[in-house]
Amino acid sequence: MLEKLFKLKENQTSVKTEIIAGLTTFLTMAYIIFVNPSILSQTGMDQGAVFVATCLAAAVGCFIMGLYANYPVAQAPGMGLNAFFTYTVVMQMGYTWEVALGAVFVSGVCFILLSIFKIRAWIINSIPISLRSGISAGIGLFLALIALKGCGIVVGNAATIISLGDITTFQAVMGALGFFFIVALTHHKIKGAVVISILAVTVIGLVCGQIKYTGFVSMPPSIAPTFLALDLSGVFTLSMISVIFAFLFVDLFDTAGTLMAVATESGMVDKNGRIPRMGRALIADSTATAVGALFGTSNTTSYVESTAGVAEGGRTGLTAVTVGVLFLLALFFAPLAGMVPAYATAGALLYVAILMISGLAKVDWKDLTEAAPVMVVSLMMPFTYSIANGIALGFISYAVIKLLSGRAKEVNIGVWIIALIFLAKFIFLG
């Protein structure tokens, strides 16, 4: 049955290899079961329900990716997207988390339609590589600011806007220590470095009496507080256009970039640079986002950590299915997830920030018409505390700079359309 489903021999792999690859991938991304509930619960969502929604959305995404697309790509609620959901859509723009879930669902449905009608390729190809890199880096800087603020290393200041906090506090020291742990463990190629660091800092907090022990294993909490709680009535307004655009674009780029990385690592890219079954993989990702919104979590996306499993020999969807099964087993560790404090996940956010900022290496810094919009995107996200504003200003600046530089022909029609939509949004909606 497994041979028929996943074509193991054709892909020169085995059940044992695929399971080991799946375990490896899971260990590198399991931090999301601690980090996602921690972030989304700040909107007022029930943390236990979000924990269950996170595990279920990840499992469903992995199963669809594995069984339908036969790719060794794991899925789970995405970093950056959860921060946008919480800090921008809910906490800054003032929408309820129910309406934000509605926006996630709509973006997932739009992604499905774009995938079915093959418009996704046009969108991906129309966005300059420099802007894609800038968006990724901006989200990384945004996550870094959230992490530093969360553990008290960076604090607000009326005179200088932000300043250094008291770095001798327990949470600041633990946040920094967690980050150092991750970097050191990753340097030594220890699998599950992020999870190990989060658990280590949590244990230190328990020993020092900073965390109340509530147990490690139990039956999963109820998902009722977030299940089907999305509110679609508040989504279809002009002011939500930029929100849906942001959810859609970031998810689209995350998925496309991850699939390219995994396909390249596994040798799946053909001689023309095309990825086989790309359409199925994108449909799997978008379907998982829509389903995840129904459960009660932000956008589900493909994880670049899947390359860790591919490096261990994962070549088929059995790797993704294995990850999905492990996420289901993680449902029984809700008490442990509930004990993890914000300072224990701060190091993970900083580590993810490093991975996302590294994309700036692909930018042609000698061409100011490419470099300047990248800096606009990268800086405006953390400085305006909004991923949507960063993306919007990045597109507008790219189009205007190319136009004034006499290089308007280099701008794809897709960029012009998106830039004009965002410009109209700022003019008429603020």
Image (tube, rainbow, N blue to C red):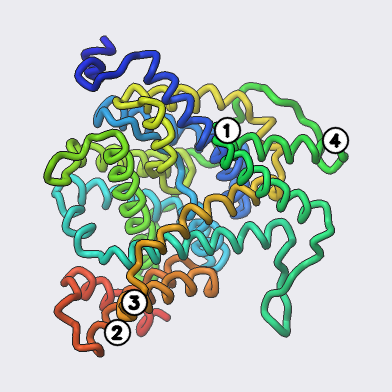
Contact flag, marks 4 and 3 (Cβ < 8 Å): no
Other-residue count near label 4 (Cα within 10 Å), few / some / many at <14 / 14–19 / ≥20: few
Residue drawn at x 35%, y 83% is: 428
The residue sitting at the right extreme is 209
Q: Earlier in the sequence, mark 3 or mark 1?
A: 1
Q: Earlier in the sequence, mark 2 or mark 3?
A: 3
Q: Tell me the distance, in whole angstroms, between the alpha carbons under discs 2 and 4.
A: 56 Å
Q: Tell me the distance, in whole angstroms, between the alpha carbons under discs 2 and 3.
A: 15 Å
Residue drawn at x 22%, y 35% is: 268
Amino acid at the residue labelled 1: Ile
Report the side of 61 relative to 332 (left or right): left
Q: Is residue 156 above or below residue 74?
A: below
Label 1 belongs to which residue? 190
Amino acid at the residue labelled 2: Ile
Kindly report which numbered mark, 4 or 3, lies closer to the viewer in this rendering: 3
Residue 236 in view, yes or no: no
Kindly report which numbered mark, 1 or 2, lies closer to the viewer in this rendering: 1
Label 3 belongs to which residue? 366
Label 2 belongs to which residue? 401
Amino acid at the residue labelled 3: Lys
Residue drawn at x 36%, y 39% is: 288
Amino acid at the residue labelled 4: Val
